[in-house]
Image (cartoon, rainbow, N blue to C red):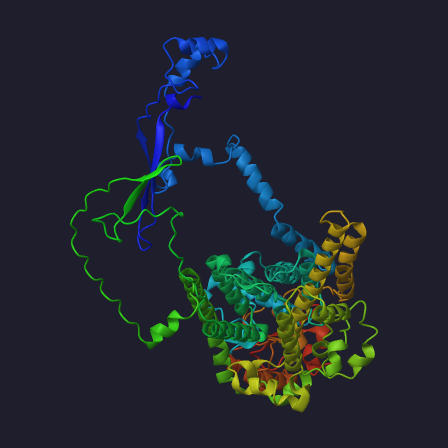
Amino acid sequence: MRASTLPHRRHIVARRAPSAVPRRIRTVRTKPPTEPPATKPTGKPIEKGAGKAAEKAGSRPKVSLVRRVNLLRRTPKKRRVSLRKPAAQQPGKWKAFAPSTGPRPGPVTRVVRAIGHAVFHEYTLATLGSLVLAIIMTWPTMRHPTRTIPQDLGDPLLQAWQLAWSGHALDTKPGTIWDSNTFFPEHTTFAYSDTLLGFAPLGLVGSGISAAILRYNIVFTLAFALAFLGAYALARQLGAYRSGAVVAAAAFAYAPWRWGQAGHLHVLSSGGIVLALAMLARGHGFTLRHGYRPNDVRPGWALAGWLVAAWQISLGFGIGLPFAYVLALLVVAAMIAWLATPRRLVLPTPPAQPDPIPDSGTRPGVTESEPQVDVIEFGVMRPEPADPVQPTQPPQPPRPPREPGPIGRWLSRRPPVPKRLLGADVLGGLVFAAVGVFMAIPYLKVVDEHPYARRGVDELDIYSPPAYGFLTAPAESWLWGHEHSGLRATMTAPNESALLIGFVLIGLALAGLVYSAWPYYVRFVLLVGMIVSVLLAMGTAAPFGGAVTYLPLHQWLPGWDGIRTPGRLVLWTTLIAGLLAAGAVSAFVERARDFTIERGFGPYPGPLLRLALLLPLALVLVEGVSASGHPEVPRPPAGLAEAAAPLLILPSDQASDEMYMLWSTQGFPPMVNGGSGFTPAGQSEVREVAAGFPDAASIRLLRDLGVRTVVVVKSMVAGTAYEAAANPETFGEDIEVEETPELVIYHL
């Protein structure tokens, strides 16, 4: 293309002083320069007509007429993209910068893709897997879910009644939920033990004894599933690979010591603890590998974590109170870390330096601070006259900024906190505190009315496990239960003292201290936490009688004196050991991936390595298999539901009363019977006096209490102090006795 036929361009560069705004480049069109006449080699002008002869001779290529017209035609002006305007205001101009996209999918395709993404999401599969694994590991709980109950006919029956009563109270009179139908005529009787109030919505479905047993079995199975899912989510959020997270989840949910607590649903329901910690860690962008990452902050997840923590507190203070103090400890640690961490210094970006252009000097009449304009042509540069300088007003001096005070200066040196995250933490913390206060008020009232409900040091001595208890499995362990029977025989409370977390888990945790995906300082912190949790779980059996470990908490922390079983703090030992094990397995996964890449097989391990990754999970699950019994629940005798309330059922003791509580789910009649973590003084007096029933003293006491009916169960009274009451006799004209094949009913 001939240069003489195209418009000539020259670039004007605004060159400014170093303190001025960076320069801009603008394009100016000018007329093309005139072409000098062609000359011969001798320097003389070429005569007319000589050019045609030269073309014919071959000195210049022949150009057709169409080609000449195209060369003379002006090229179309291209669209210019502005860097000042947003892309939304110039959509057509930015299409050249966007990648090519295919046709937009229709609504049906988008819905199908969304459903597929949700179904095959990692946590969807983890949820389904945790449910299936829970059914398998707790089998045969769901074989006859309306007739049998796990473990024994003691505390599980009490907790089945609790689930039913909370739903019944919400459906009828929510304001009287704390005044249950048991322990008549006492008040606030629902707070005599951990209430499992968080499961109250499940009590709204179904009524009667069969529904109560089915509800308990479902919640029992879901408790293990939630523990597995929560531990998996926590390990994944903290930075473990899937294989490591699965091992940590299985170790936490199916540790052998849990089967010794199979009759305590409020202890098994610890999944909310790990799930809340996982959500809080995700909301605050925290991992064990990278620490706090501000770009990963999710305020919504933080708020959800606080709500799950509040729900966990509503299940009871047995394990909920230590969880609340752990959260408080984490909040204090986060505040200390924020106060001790200075704000990261961000150096100001230096102004853009102009391209190196030969300086032609400052022109006369133009100061250094004013722009100088140079014209840069293709290889040629010459000065161009600048615009006349316009007189300007002297700039007003800016108002000096207000000097911050000492607190402001100190806070300005701290790392910034996202406002939405701070708001989520404040709101979630307030909800958590409100639920804790709501749950604590009735318990404080119970302690005020029954001071002997507080746990003394003598009772702690009974339930404090020895050091070898952490290596002893409960009787319900399928693998180690029979082998450790000799060790359990030396314990005063075997179910609360046999606290084996699993030998496989112990080995993986020790390996995680040496070879792990976690940094060294994280392993050290986890090791310290594990040792502290063991010392606290030992209670008064710790060194120096627990004088420097557990007893200060029992004496000074509010509410801690209501905990009589220190061994249940092994839950935190299991969680920390599971995280150490997850670090070890994750490091092995990384090494296996590097091993396959080094040998050219890609990032995916072969079959043998995959089987090796599944081996720790298989060993943990085998060690967590249960041998718990599933007895069939006796049905209430015929005629019991028609007895006039308030009533007293004989014989009366802790085990029998818990069965009567389940029977009372048919209508929830007020009854003197009841079982809990302590025995009220009034109930002890009734049991003692009723041993002589139907004598005059017992009848007088029961009438003063307002009892209308005394029911004696013939099949249960034999061999007890109440055996004489099974012989129907009439004492006075105002007492009516009714006898059935299974009951003796006294109408007072």
Which residue is drawn at the image coordinates 38% and 74% (left, top)?
410
Location of residue 389 with respect to 318 vertically, above or below: above
User: Picture coordinates of residue 707 (x, y %)?
Assistant: 54, 77
Q: Is residue 547 visible?
A: yes
User: Picture coordinates of residue 94 (x, y %)?
Assistant: 42, 35
Quarter-wise, where is residue 488 in the image?
Answer: bottom right
Residue 233 appears left or right of 510: left
Foreground residue among 454 and 399:
399
Foreground residue among 526 and 673:
526
User: Picture coordinates of residue 231 (x, y %)?
Assistant: 63, 62
Foreground residue among 147 and 108:
108
Q: Is residue 642 visible?
A: no
Location of residue 556 with respect to 32 vertically, above or below: below
Which residue is drawn at the image coordinates 57% and 79% (left, top)?
733
Rendered-image quadrant of the C terminus: bottom right
Q: How many marks?
A: 0
